[in-house]
């Protein structure tokens, strides 16, 4: 029931967006018109004020087969009059089917859609629009500022979200609205893209693991065929995926579970990844975690992209099957996006991966020789 109310709140805010976008063809719109209030009791609640939300600047598939082996306005009075006697539920029903078959739920033309999330927000896009949703406890004072290339959301005067957008927008066609949702406030921002197409994310840096905040550092000392070859230092993203980081940290330290010490890298595919972490069977068929009586735990989020070498992620055997196995990428492998949880990156020792470990592998993942973690732990 709570999820249903949440979905309805989003839908109602979207109806406001659609109405504003439709009316703008008839009414001269101020730059970045924003409805401060959302919808109450099945009809649009008008606060009698609009705000400027911002100033306009001018108006390898072969390797994919290995996926399975990774783990066992200016005239506001007129605009307001257009909303009178509007029944939101009827409009929602219309938008979902009969009335506007070419209109997506998020204000753009129908067709390809994508969704994603950041630390404190979610987004959904079509090729024409990008829509942002945020939720805040209580009833704070929310502000939105948007230019053609940047966005900033403030809550009670504090910045909650800021950064460069994933593409340019028409500021004149940007709106935002708030809606009460139980004991929280829901914010919806709709952005009209200048150039038709899908962005990689709401923000230009979204999903970039090389820009993520490192909260903990760990190390893996590696030996090849009995000879020490050096140390790999890894930075973990505790702000973004705290549960996954806590699990990996415990395995590095042997805190309540077996550690990675003396565990081999059991699968190496050149140009793709190095995989290890099977602390029970040592061959890729096992593993444990600190959760659920040492069983599997759920995918925490898919906030980052596999777009570079040195990405640290959880190996799995399908959704929500994370245990102790992990892999480090040797190149971009974006077909794994939204399938495996990324939780860190290589800080130093990438040369050990490429010069000492990568040559041991082949396209089947078999390892010729011995590649073993001989020491591990947390760095201060």
Image (cartoon, rainbow, N blue to C red):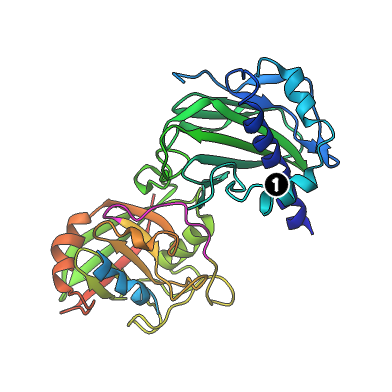
The residue that appears at 34% across and 77% down in the rendered structure is: 69
Q: Is residue 261 visible?
A: no
Where, by quadrant of the figure, is residue 39 drawn?
top right
Residue 30 percent coordinates (x, y): 61, 17
Q: Is residue 28 left or right of residue 196?
A: right
User: Is the residue 116 above or below the residue 37 in the image?
Assistant: below
The residue that appears at 76% across and 34% down in the rendered structure is: 139
Residue 3 percent coordinates (x, y): 73, 57
Verify whether residue 302 appears in magenta: yes
User: Is the residue 109 above or below the residue 339 in the image?
Assistant: above
Q: Is residue 115 left or right of residue 135?
A: left
Q: Badge 1: few (under 14), some or many (20 or more) residues near its Cα, within 10 Å?
A: many
Residue 329 percent coordinates (x, y): 28, 60
User: Is the residue 35 above or below the residue 125 in the image?
Assistant: above
In the picture of the structure, the residue carrying the numbered disc 1 is: 11
Viewer-proximal residue among 143 and 366 = 143
Where, by quadrant of the figure, is residue 264 drawn?
bottom left
User: Is the residue 213 above or below the residue 227 in the image?
Assistant: above
The residue that appears at 49% across and 40% down in the rendered structure is: 128
Residue 185 percent coordinates (x, y): 73, 39
From the image, which quarter does the N terminus lie in? bottom right
Viewer-proximal residue among 40 and 152 = 40
SS state under label 1: helix
Verify whether residue 204 appears in magenta: no
Highlighted range, magenta? 299-310
The residue that appears at 65% across and 37% down in the rendered structure is: 18
């Amino acid at each position: 029931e709570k999820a249903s109310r949440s979905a309805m709140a989003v839908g109602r805010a979207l109806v406001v967006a659609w109405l504003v976008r439709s009316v703008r063809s008839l009414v001269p719109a101020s730059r970045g018109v924003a409805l401060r209030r959302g919808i109450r009791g099945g009809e649009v609640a008008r606060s009698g004020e609009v705000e400027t939300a911002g100033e306009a600047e001018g108006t390898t598939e072969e390797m994919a087969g290995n996926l399975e082996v990774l783990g066992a306005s200016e005239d506001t009075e007129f605009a307001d009059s257009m909303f009178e006697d509007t029944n939101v539920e009827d409009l929602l029903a219309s938008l979902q089917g009969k009335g506007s078959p070419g209109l997506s739920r998020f204000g753009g033309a129908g067709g390809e859609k994508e969704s994603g999330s950041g630390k404190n927000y979610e987004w959904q896009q079509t090729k024409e629009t990008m829509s942002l949703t945020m939720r805040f406890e209580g009833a704070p004072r929310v502000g939105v500022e948007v230019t053609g290339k940047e966005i900033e959301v403030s809550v009670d005067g504090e910045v909650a979200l800021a950064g460069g957008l994933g593409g340019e927008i028409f500021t004149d066609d940007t709106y935002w609205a708030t809606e009460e949702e139980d004991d929280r406030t829901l914010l919806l921002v709709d952005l009209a893209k200048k150039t038709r197409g899908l962005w990689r994310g709401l923000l230009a840096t979204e999903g970039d693991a090389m820009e993520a905040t490192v909260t903990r550092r760990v190390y893996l000392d590696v030996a090849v065929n009995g000879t020490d070859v050096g140390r790999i230092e890894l930075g973990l993203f505790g702000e973004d995926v705290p549960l996954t980081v806590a699990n990996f940290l415990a395995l590095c330290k042997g805190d309540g579970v077996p550690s990675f010490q003396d565990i081999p890298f059991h699968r190496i595919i050149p140009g793709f990844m190095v995989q290890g972490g099977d602390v029970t069977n040592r061959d890729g068929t096992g593993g444990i975690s600190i959760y659920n009586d040492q069983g599997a735990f759920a995918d925490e989020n898919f906030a980052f992209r596999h777009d570079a070498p040195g990405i640290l992620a959880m190996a799995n055997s399908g959704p929500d099957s994370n245990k102790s196995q992990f892999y480090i990428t040797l190149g971009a492998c974006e077909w794994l996006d939204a399938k495996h949880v990324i939780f860190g990156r290589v800080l130093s020792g990438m040369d050990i991966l490429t010069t000492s470990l990568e040559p041991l592998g082949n396209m089947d993942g078999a390892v010729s020789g011995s590649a073993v973690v001989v020491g591990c732990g947390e760095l201060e």
